[in-house]
Image (cartoon, coloured by chain):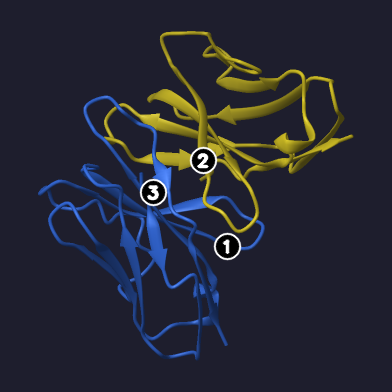
Chain colours: A blue, B yellow
Amino acid sequence: GAGVSQSPSNKVTEKGKDVELRCDPISGHTALYWYRQRLGQGLEFLIYFQGNSAPDKSGLPSDRFSAERTGESVSTLTIQRTQQEDSAVYLCASSFTGGWYEQYFGPGTRLTVT
Amino acid sequence: DQQVKQNSPSLSVQEGRISILNCDYTNSMFDYFLWYKKYPAEGPTFLISISSIKDKNEDGRFTVFLNKSAKHLSLHIVPSQPGDSAVYFCAAKEETSGSRLTFGEGTQLTVNP
């Protein structure tokens, strides 16, 4: 079966431009998560969607970051006015709920801000 | 505030020997712990988990041990194989945070043939 997919796999952008990253979760997974991993660091939680509940945005580093999810399907993470410190791998994960805590990750989008 | 810490950035072992990866945490509200493995240019993949009501969970060559009093967990891989070479992340879930996970920094395991 299909896993979590993300696009693009790589994105190079100039400082100050906006970027949009896409995540397609595993079908049937009600929860969706965005993380980022900077070079040499662990995974940093950004945002969490659970069904139709209000998303947990507590990990978003600034108001330049936003994310949307349509129902229980595709999610997009948008970074406005990108800065060099936004350079990282952005990882999306999805999971079942109801006691299933294992998250399934996509391959990530490597974002480089020049 | 790093609530989940993996103090060893790297570990090197010989094929066939035991690999022991360690993880410490500070949040006593964590009630579920997971280990993930990550190969270069891929997303992390789930490996094994343990509930806070247990102290050991075993799955084939992989065993996770939890010491709640010490706020410490470890992953044992035995026997280690070259294909186990990857970055291993420890993660924890807080009982009131839904499914949100807090990850450690990762440990690069290298298994030498």
Q: Position of residue B76 (x, y in %)?
A: 68, 20
Q: Which residue is the site of mark 1?
A: A38
Label 3: few (<14), some (14–19) or many (≥20) C-alpha neighbours in 10 Å: some
Q: Which residue is the site of mark 3?
A: A3
Which corner quadrant holds the C terminus of chain A? bottom right
Residue at the (31%, 28%) spot, across then down: A100
Of badges 1 and 2, nearer the viewer stands: 2
Q: Dot 2: what SS?
A: strand
Tags 1 and 3 touching, CB below 8 Å:
no
Q: Which mark is residue B45?
A: 2
Residue at the (52%, 14%) spot, across then down: B68
Mark 1 belongs to which amino acid?
Arg
Which corner quadrant holds the N terminus of chain A? top left
Mark 3 belongs to which amino acid?
Gly
Whether discs 3 and 2 lie on one chain: the answer is no
Q: Residue furthest left?
A: A52
Mark 2 belongs to which amino acid?
Thr
Of badges 3 and 2, nearer the viewer stands: 3
Q: Is residue B89 above or below residue B47?
A: below
The chain carrying label 3 is A
Tags 1 and 2 touching, CB below 8 Å:
no
Q: Is residue A32 above or below residue B50?
A: below
